[in-house]
Image (cartoon, rainbow, N blue to C red):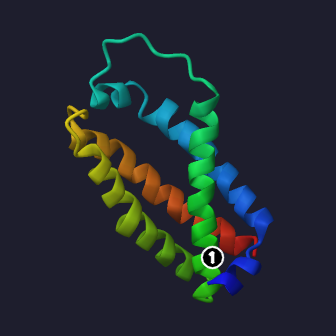
Amino acid sequence: MIDALAHVKWLAVFVASIAHFVFGAVWFVGIVGTRYADALGIADRPPAKPGALFLVGPFACSAVTVVASAILLRALGITSYGGALGLGALVGLGYLVPMTVNIAINPLFPRPFYYALLNAPFFVVGSLMACAILVALS
């Protein structure tokens, strides 16, 4: 794994991270919109002004996921789009979706499965997209 880290194409990681971040903005502002607040039980509150953490946090978290995917792609010797999409699906469906559901199953989430339903597709598509970009630019 350490050897795979040494061969990661960092430009590809950066591009995939930016693409994932932009997709997140489109997903959560344009597609999911007010339903997200409804899933969290805060639809009756005025929208909060997003601070720096709102922008930097999601970018940093997705960048870590993209780096992990880049390491796995290298370590597994995946160079085809089919292989990349297979890994993206495995990461999305095998790790990110269950993690999202696990986080949502919390007494503070009034509608945990609705929350998961809004978030899970973003993580799966984002993982597929990131892995495809990583292979394309490697």
Q: Residue 109 placed where, x, y %? A: 25, 35
Q: Is residue 72 left or right of residue 12?
A: left
* Quadrant holding the C terminus: bottom right
Observer-nearest residue: 51 or 36? 51
Q: Residue 115 placed where, x, y %? A: 30, 40
Q: Residue furthest right?
A: 11
Q: Quadrant of residue 73?
A: bottom right
Q: Is residue 130 left or right of residue 112?
A: right
Q: Residue furthest bottom?
A: 77
Q: Is residue 87 left or right of residue 75?
A: left
Q: Is residue 56 above or below residue 131?
A: above
Disc 1: which residue: 71
Q: Residue 83 placed where, x, y %? A: 54, 82
What secondary structure is marked by label 1? helix
- Residue at the spot 64% in from the left edge and 28% down from the top edge: 52
Amino acid under disc 1: Ile
Q: Quadrant of residue 37?
A: top left
Q: Residue 16 placed where, x, y %? A: 67, 58
Asked whether the viewer can see residue 113, the reply is yes
- Residue at the spot 63% in from the left edge and 43% down from the top edge: 22
Asked whether the viewer can see residue 81, the reply is no
- Residue at the spot 44% in from the left edge and 59% down from the top edge: 124
- Residue at the spot 32% in from the left edge and 18% down from the top edge: 43
Q: Is residue 60 left or right of residue 90?
A: right
Figure label count: 1
